[in-house]
Image (tube, grey):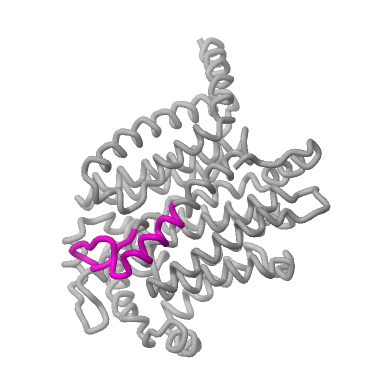
Amino acid sequence: MIEKIMAAADCFGQWYQKLLKSCFFLSAIAVILFQPSYFTQLPVLDKVYDVLQILAGLCIGICYLAEIVRKRRINPIVALVAVYYGILILSTLLNQGDMKGILLRSANFVIICMMLDLIAVYNPKGLISSLLIVLEAMVYLNLVTILIFPEGLYASDYFSAYWFLGYKNQMINVMLPAACFGMIRYHMETEGKLEKNWKAWIRAFILILTTVLSAVLVHSGASILITGAMLIFWLFQGCFVDKLFNFRNYLILNILLFFVIVIFRMQNLFAFLIEDILHKNLTLTGRTVIWDRTLELIGEKPILGHGVPFYEDRKLQYAIETKWINKAAGLHAHDRFLETLYRGGIVLLIHYLAILLTTNHYLMKFRKLKGAKIIAFTLFVYLTGMITEFYDFSPMFFGLMTLSCYCDRFESAGMKDAENGTEGSI
């Protein structure tokens, strides 16, 4: 019986391996799984997306299970992410929270990690190319909506201005991965070649510059810092030596910043940055008040947390409204570590740290490779932004961690093209 299952899995595996080599198929999957925020405002299109995402999820899930049967292996980060969301679902169930919301979000994020893991094995260059062309298009469309509708493309009960990629602080969830893939794509095009590929360099530069411009136009302080840091990294990446600029050091620095700013409230050390550049007060626009209330709520349920509550319930838990904080400010803790503790308690926090440490293992293993340096820095600025924000819809946060396992494949894919004298088609 086992031999028949293995034979069927091998036969199926040969079929989907051919499918995964199609950039059109990969781009179509990316379009389906990365739904722009604006499309959720169009009822008919939103329902079409729901159906397509279910079908895409089933397709990827079946292929991934077949891969596990064939290879008898599973990416440890994908496994950890799946358990992470399992804990979050359990906590939400026990607290009678928003089960529909967390189930849909969890399925989407885990499926994306599975997709990245599956395709990176067989077609790493096609994966980066397909993701780049989709996310790149979304970044440019978002800029167009910002320029045409400076006051916002649409509004909601919580905020008055949203654009193609949503609210200003959440745009980074697409812009940052797009910039990352633009950089990786450039290095895959130039790896092993004597001459610089200026076409690929300019393409990446314009993309990163667009993310900076978008952040500036919508006045998102955290996004300006993040995209600005990516631009500096792109222009001066030769100065980022791996002995100092590596994920281990980035992670240590991020944890130190969490304690300095969120726990010990020593943000006066960064007064120039906060007040003169970000144009915020030293309460970080009232975030210190939210952090205090979040810590109180964490103390009420420290083991498994509160789960993911409905929006109205979360607002009642906080009941905060000051001259700095609008009625929607209490929808999250404005910090990744605090939000993790709030939602899943100590259990979820330990699991989250396990994901970070596993990612650190791979990025330190490949730290001399350009792909690893890019992913490590991207995750660093992402995590830094999460000191004062919680990016709720961030599928590529764990997705980038999943890709950290394949930095050597990105390098070898570029070398293979150089040996064959070929360039990418996208």
Residues in magenta? 138-163
Taking the magenta stretch, the answer to whether it contains residue 133 is no
**Frontmost residue, 406 versus 333:** 406
Q: Where is residue 216, by image quadrant? A: bottom left
**In the displayed structure, would residue 197 be above or below residue 57?**
below
Residue depicted at 54% across the width and 42% down the height: 130
Left or right: 40, with 347 as reference point: left
Tell me residue 368's x, y (percent): 74, 57
**In the displayed structure, would residue 307 be above or below residue 334?**
above
Tell me residue 115's x, y (percent): 49, 38
Tell me residue 376's x, y (percent): 61, 59
Residue depicted at 27% across the width and 41% down the height: 45
Quadrant (top left, top right, bottom left, bottom right) of the C terminus: top right
Residue at the extreme right? 194
**Frontmost residue, 216 versus 229:** 216
**In the displayed structure, would residue 279 be above or below residue 257?**
below
Q: Count numbered badges in the picture.
A: 0
Left or right: 105, with 192 as reference point: left
Residue at the extreme front? 148
Residue depicted at 43% across the width and 58% down the height: 173
Tell me residue 194's x, y (percent): 83, 52
Left or right: 384, with 412 as reference point: left
Taking the magenta stretch, the answer to whether it contains residue 149 is yes
Q: Where is residue 248, by image quadrant? A: bottom right
Residue depicted at 52% across the width and 70% down the height: 255
Res 264 seen here: yes
